């Protein structure tokens, strides 16, 4: 396979079914992130745990735009960020530390997305937390949201413990003065959480000062957890999103 003058091998038919599925799903996430408008030049990453019990993970390669990532270009590494196979593809080791921090303490974090989305980063810089002023925020708060106070760029191993302590059992993490992280047991779950969190941030920023907003009644808030437990919205749009990618450029699954 080729990207410009750079060549790398196709792994289709050369890895386990579980690994190939994780590769296709993560490559799809990488393609969807810029389509959703969450991309920036820092290439905030996405990652996946390979679901075969091997203890191996997939991470996006250095030098590829997210819209150029393919299933074969994803780099297989250990939890510590060591390369599993000989490969011409490399990772940004510092970028793996925050993802490693999440994967290490959350067995349900099969997919992790990190974003510097403008609206999420803007909310992360405000004194107000995410407020229960929209249906989207209601679901985010019911699903588990935590905050991490900025203690320096998270691209260092020594920052991992504080990220882990802040995350706890939450499924979404607002990194103060930085951005956001979401996790999921399937790819769409991480994506949907990111979309819901971002939408909540947008609405709150548009709504203005906290003194002017109308919060959802505390008596209503438990209903959001009940809806989540009912499983009404899980992965019902994932296949549609894959069809969209197929129409635009099916090379993500190569």
Image (tube, grey):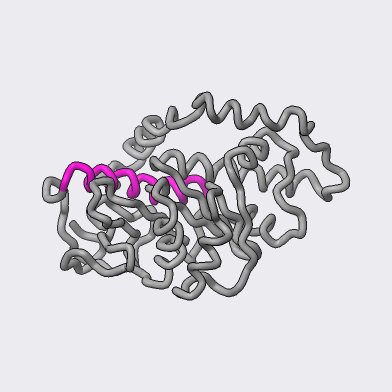
Q: Viewed as shown, does residue 239 lie left or right of 200?
A: left
Residue at 66% in and 27% down: 223
Q: Position of residue 185 (x, y in %)?
A: 40, 42
User: Is 238 part of what is drawn in magenta?
Assistant: no
The magenta segment is 16-37
Residue at 87% in and 44% down: 212
Up the image or down, 236 lies above or below 69; here it is above
Q: Position of residue 190 (x, y in %)?
A: 46, 44
* Closer to us: 249 or 76: 76
Q: Quadrant of residue 58?
A: bottom left
Q: Viewed as shown, does residue 216 lie left or right of 87?
A: right
Residue at 64% in and 65% down: 149
* Closer to us: 251 or 142: 142
Q: Quadrant of residue 43?
A: bottom left
Q: Viewed as shown, does residue 163 lie left or right of 80?
A: right
Residue at 61% in and 56% down: 174
Q: How many marks?
A: 0
User: Is 36 part of what is drawn in magenta?
Assistant: yes
Up the image or down, 161 lies above or below 22; here it is below
For the N terminus, the image quarter is bottom left
Q: Viewed as shown, does residue 212 lie left or right of 222?
A: right
Check the image and name the residue furthest to the left.
Answer: 14
> Is residue 15 at least partly visible in the picture?
yes
> Is residue 254 at least partly visible in the picture?
no
- Secondary structure character of the magenta stretch overall: helix
Q: Position of residue 65 (x, y in %)?
A: 38, 60
């Amino acid at each position: 396979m080729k990207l410009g003058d750079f060549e790398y091998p196709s792994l289709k038919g050369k890895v386990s079914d579980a690994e190939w599925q994780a590769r296709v799903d993560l490559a799809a996430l990488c393609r969807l992130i810029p389509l959703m408008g969450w991309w920036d030049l820092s290439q905030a990453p996405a990652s996946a745990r390979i679901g075969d019990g091997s203890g191996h993970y997939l991470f996006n390669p250095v030098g590829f735009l997210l819209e150029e990532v393919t299933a074969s270009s994803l780099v297989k590494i250990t939890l510590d960020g060591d390369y599993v196979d000989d490969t011409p593809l490399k990772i940004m080791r510092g970028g793996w530390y925050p993802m490693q921090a999440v994967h290490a303490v959350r067995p349900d974090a099969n997919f992790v997305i990190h974003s510097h989305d403008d609206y999420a980063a803007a909310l992360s810089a405000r004194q107000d937390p995410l407020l229960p002023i929209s249906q989207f925020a209601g679901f985010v708060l019911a699903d588990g949201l935590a905050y991490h106070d900025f203690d320096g760029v998270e691209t260092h191993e020594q920052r991992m413990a504080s990220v882990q302590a802040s995350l706890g059992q939450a499924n979404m993490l607002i990194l103060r003065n930085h951005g956001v992280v979401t996790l999921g047991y399937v790819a769409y779950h991480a994506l949907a959480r990111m979309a819901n969190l971002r939408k909540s941030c947008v609405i709150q920023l548009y709504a203005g000062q906290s003194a002017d907003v109308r919060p959802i009644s505390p008596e209503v808030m438990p209903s959001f957890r009940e809806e989540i437990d009912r499983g009404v919205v899980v992965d019902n749009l994932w296949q549609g999103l894959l069809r969209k990618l197929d129409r635009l450029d099916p090379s993500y699954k190569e």
